Image (cartoon, helix red, strand yellow):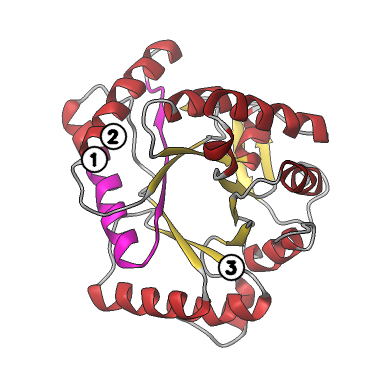
Amino acid sequence: MIRIGPSGNSETFYASGRAHTYEEAEFLHGLGLNAFEYSFGRGVRISEAAAEKIKTEFGKYGIELSVHAPYYTNFANPDPEMIGKSIGYVLQSIAACKKMGGERVVFHPAACGKAERVEAVKATKANLVLLAEACEKLDCGEFKICAETMGKRNQIGTVEEVVDFCLLYDKMYPCFDFGHINAYTCGGIKTKDDYRRILDYTIDKLGFEKASNMHVHFSKIQYGDKGEIRHLTFEDSVYGPEYAPLAELFDEYKMSPYIVCESNGTMSDDALTMKKLHKNA
């Protein structure tokens, strides 16, 4: 089953008179959506009571929940202390996610900084092994940590890099942000075959089970020479990418991705548009 929903609370959510994240469950259920991503972008902070309330309400309405770890994880940092902090941010996110009833945590892999890209990628892989070892020590049952493709040229996280990272650990899955991929390649996703190449490559390298259960971020994104500039809405007709060809492929391949819409303010509306493009969502 394909799961689709928004990242965060949309303008439509607030316009409905709702104000608290636990109310997203009833809101999304009413729309026919079945996924939601909670962001700890600026730090992992949520009370036990709030986490339990979210878990109860999301379970009641059958909404699956994922969590985004703090945005400043960087597994290419040359400082061991900072690597320890990045590992800590992911572990804290996993613990909070489990309390909220979720089983997926998304994280940003790395940035090049002053290092050459080949060296930064090498360091990232070595430090992700340390992350995997730390995750294995957690007693939190089933979970997936999802390495995200990135949208700026100085960041680590191309399709190939992310797929390679996912070979390091059986619980590491790709998070393909197709808006980021399109921005990084300055408009490289234009056709169904452009999407097909990404899916075929991933299936070939990771196997169908892991590829099928990939995490997906989707939005249209403005970009420049250095990549991503800002998230847009589905009203954009300049930058793309378009979702319909990807929806066709997910249905054709009978894949079961977890899809999160990251449009700027219209994420629940655009997530519903995405769902309507599927035959089995």
Which residue is rendered at x = 71% and y = 56% of the image? Answer: 233
Position in image of residue 61 (x %, y %): 52, 79
Residue that carries the numbered disc 3 in the rendered image? 34
Any part of residue 240 in sight: no
Alpha carbons under labels 2 and 1: distance apart: 6 Å
Q: Earlier in the sequence, mark 2 or mark 3?
A: 3
Residue 100 highlighted magenta (yes or no): yes
Q: Is residue 258 above or below residue 276?
A: above
Which residue is disc 1 drawn over? Answer: 136
Residue at (46%, 80%) from the top-left corner? Answer: 60
Q: Give yes or no for contact between labels 2 and 1 (Cβ–Cβ under 8 Å).
A: yes
Label 1 sits on a secondary structure element that is helix
Disc 3 residue type (three-letter): Asn
In-front residue for pair 67/112 = 67
Q: Residue at point 38% right, 23% down?
A: 113
Amino acid type, label 2: Ala
The stretch of residues the image draws in magenta is 87-113
